[in-house]
């Protein structure tokens, strides 16, 4: 079909697939390097989606909803108790004995961590922004080149079809 050949965007699509894979992998690596993999849910939820039709191609990243609490600083607040309990259970936290030599229970650890967050908030990683800057620096010139090739191919096809059919 003429429309499929005219608006194929094959070069652009290929580069955007590579971009999406590299972005996802670099983001996952950044979470690992920053020790942000308590349960592995955030890490394993990182997936890319590429949607294409004859007029556009889009790349998006899907990630667990709580990414925002990892990515951005939070103001002091009491975090949900169940989230703190889950964190204490999945993150290998080595409790320290109190002044009487007793180790805190998981509930007590969750409370202590929650109390600290209620006083200081949390510091975000900004990994998505850093990853985007890193991957964009490499891929924006490649995307520009691929788009240029696709436009050239489309122009050649249009001119060729015009002269052949007229």
Image (cartoon, helix red, strand yellow):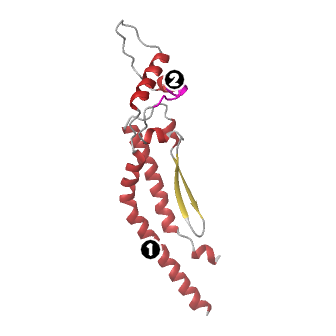
Q: Is residue 77 above or below residue 10?
A: above
Q: Which mark is residue 123?
A: none
Q: Say few, some or many: other residues with alpha carbon within 10 Å of mark 2 (under 14 / 14 to 19 / 20 or more).
A: some
> Residue 107 appears at what percent x and percent y?
50, 17
Q: Say few, some or many: other residues with alpha carbon within 10 Å of mark 1 (under 14 / 14 to 19 / 20 or more).
A: some
Q: Which residue is mark 2?
A: 85
Res 126 → quadrant = top left
Q: Which residue is mark 1?
A: 148
Is residue 89 found inside the magenta-colored segment of the image? no
Q: Residue furthest toward the bottom?
A: 166
Secondary structure beneath dot 1 equals helix
Query: In the picture, which quadrant includes the N terminus?
Result: bottom right
Q: Is residue 71 above or below residue 142?
A: above
Q: Image point 54% across, 60% down: which residue? A: 58
Secondary structure beneath dot 2 equals helix
Q: Image point 52% across, 26% down: which residue? A: 86
Q: Image point 39% across, 42% down: which residue? A: 30
> Residue 133 appears at what percent x and percent y?
37, 54
Q: Is residue 116 above or below residue 135?
A: above
Res 51 → quadrant = bottom right
Q: Image point 40% across, 60% down: which residue? A: 139
Segment tinted magenta in the rendering: 77-85
> Mark 2 or mark 1, which has the lower sequence index?
2
On screen, residue 8 versus residue 121, left or right, reads: right
């Amino acid at each position: 079909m003429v429309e499929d050949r005219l608006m194929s965007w094959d070069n652009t699509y290929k580069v955007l697939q590579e971009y999406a894979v590299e972005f996802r992998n670099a983001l996952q690596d950044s979470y690992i390097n920053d020790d942000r993999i308590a349960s592995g849910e955030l890490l394993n939820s990182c997936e890319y989606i590429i949607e294409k039709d004859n007029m556009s191609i889009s790349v998006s990243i899907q990630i667990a909803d709580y990414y925002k609490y990892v990515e951005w600083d939070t103001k002091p607040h009491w975090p949900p108790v169940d989230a703190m309990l889950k964190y204490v259970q999945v993150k290998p936290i080595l409790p320290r004995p109190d002044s009487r030599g007793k180790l805190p229970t998981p509930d007590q650890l969750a409370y202590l961590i929650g109390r600290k967050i209620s006083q200081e908030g949390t510091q975000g990683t900004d990994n998505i922004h850093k990853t985007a800057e890193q991957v964009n620096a490499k891929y924006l010139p490649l995307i520009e080149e691929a788009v240029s090739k696709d436009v050239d191919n489309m122009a050649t096809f249009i001119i060729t079809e015009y002269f052949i059919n007229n």
